[in-house]
């Protein structure tokens, strides 16, 4: 949850009475003190005020006389909810300021972490692929149902979303749909809602959108391939998309490729430069998207990939964004990826308390 921290900040010369008024008005049990550059220099709780008054401080004295001058804070984007929760529990904090580039940008309360807010944005999981590169494992099991860390990968994907408040799921099926249906049913035993859309013929990552009930989807929704393992923050992804009013957003990840040879640049057979084993960096498609509902009406039931659909939107001058994914991400496309996932998942944190 992102708050307007301007509502709960004070200058060191503001009065204790003003701090009391803010504590009462916003009920966050803490107010923060910043300097002229919006850098955090202090914090005040109701306990700090109570102790100050017991020592004889006047309510018209400045907050500088009672504030805690070394408040604990966290850097924006460096910790997931589980890690923040553990810090707050260990230190008995009710709230933590969030800093970015030395500037106060947010405050997270214990209530934010404990109280799960359900998100109405649907999630569409593509689970219809054949998984041919993982045979013979996929001869009798769809790839998203292969066990990773002792349970189906698809269950881990759904749990990751559920832990962040998502509960409405659509799952596209094609290959061995009965295996997926038998495990998840309507989602009730997992405390989520699941509807299935079945591809009689493969429609690709883009064409499957045409099977969604467009009239029921009023909010931007997340699309994710059913063979992706990630612990990314999907709420931040949605915020990014919605604030910029995009028709679609593609999650991308930086990929480094090193040429294993020396590279020679020549013009008219004259060598201009030589570079030994250079590395190049590219943004690659992670198979995770946010789609605005108005795009659904433009998708036909034909085989088409999601990148092609996004290119069509770009040609129409509609806004298509890229969102950099910095958290863990693995596309389980080959056997070596599957083996790596079995090791990686042991240390992955999906934010569940």
Image (spheres, rainbow, N blue to C red):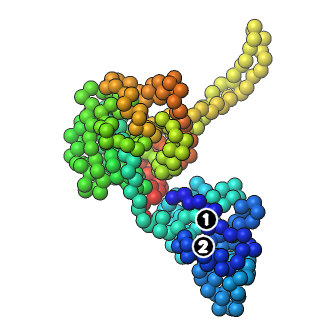
Read off the residue under disc 1.
7
Residue 225 screen position, x and y as percent: 40, 38
Could you tell me which residue is drawn at 55 percent across and 41 percent down? 244
Q: Nearer the viewer, residue 213 or 199?
A: 213
Residue 187 location in percent, x, y? 26, 51
Q: Quadrant of residue 334?
A: top left
* Left or right of 31 in this view: 149: left
Instruction: Please give the residue where the numbered disc 2 appears in the rendered image.
Output: 22
Tell me the distance, in whole angstroms, between the alpha carbons under discs 2 and 1.
8 Å
Quadrant in the picture for residue 116 = bottom left
Q: Secondary structure at mark 2?
A: helix
Choose top left, top right, bottom left or bottom right for residue 256.
top right
Q: Is residue 111 visible?
A: yes
216 to 316, vertically: above or below = below
Q: Residue at x 68, y 29 (%)?
A: 278
Residue 3 percent location from the top left of the image: 56, 60
Q: Quick one: label 2, few (<14), some, or many (20+) residues within 10 Å?
A: some
Mark 2 and mark 1 residues within 8 Å of each other at the beta carbon: yes
Residue 124, compared with residue 190, is above or below; it is above
């Amino acid at each position: 949850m992102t708050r307007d921290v301007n509502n709960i900040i004070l200058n060191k010369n503001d009065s204790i009475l003003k701090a009391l008024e803010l504590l009462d008005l916003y009920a966050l049990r803490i107010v923060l003190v910043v300097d002229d550059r919006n850098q955090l220099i202090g914090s005040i709780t109701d306990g700090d005020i109570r102790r100050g008054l017991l020592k004889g401080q006047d309510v018209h004295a400045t907050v500088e006389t009672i504030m805690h001058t070394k408040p604990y804070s966290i850097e924006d984007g460096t910790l997931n909810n589980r890690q923040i929760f553990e810090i707050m529990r260990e230190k008995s904090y009710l709230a933590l300021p969030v800093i970015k580039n030395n500037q106060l940008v947010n405050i997270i309360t214990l209530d934010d972490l404990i109280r799960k807010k359900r998100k109405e944005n649907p999630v569409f999981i593509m689970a219809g692929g054949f998984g041919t590169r993982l045979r013979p494992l996929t001869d009798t099991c769809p790839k998203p149902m292969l066990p990773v860390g002792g349970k189906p990968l698809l269950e881990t994907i759904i749990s990751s979303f559920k832990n962040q408040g998502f509960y409405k799921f659509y799952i596209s099926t094609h290959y061995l749909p009965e295996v997926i249906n038998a495990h998840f049913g309507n989602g009730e035993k997992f405390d989520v809602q699941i509807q299935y859309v079945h591809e009689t013929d493969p429609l690709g990552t883009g064409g499957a959108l045409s099977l969604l009930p467009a009239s029921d989807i009023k909010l931007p929704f997340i699309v994710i391939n059913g063979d992706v393992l990630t612990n990314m923050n999907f709420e931040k992804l949605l915020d990014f998309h919605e604030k910029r009013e995009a028709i679609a957003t593609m999650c991308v990840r930086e990929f480094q490729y090193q040429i294993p040879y020396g590279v020679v640049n020549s013009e008219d057979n004259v060598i201009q430069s030589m570079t030994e084993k250079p590395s190049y960096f590219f943004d690659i498609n992670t198979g995770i998207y946010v789609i605005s509902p108005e795009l659904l009406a433009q998708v036909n039931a034909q085989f088409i990939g999601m990148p092609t659909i996004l290119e069509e939107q770009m040609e129409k001058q509609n806004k298509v964004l890229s969102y950099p994914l910095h958290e863990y991400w693995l596309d389980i496309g080959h056997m070596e990826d599957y083996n790596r996932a079995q090791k990686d998942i042991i240390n992955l944190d999906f934010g569940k308390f």
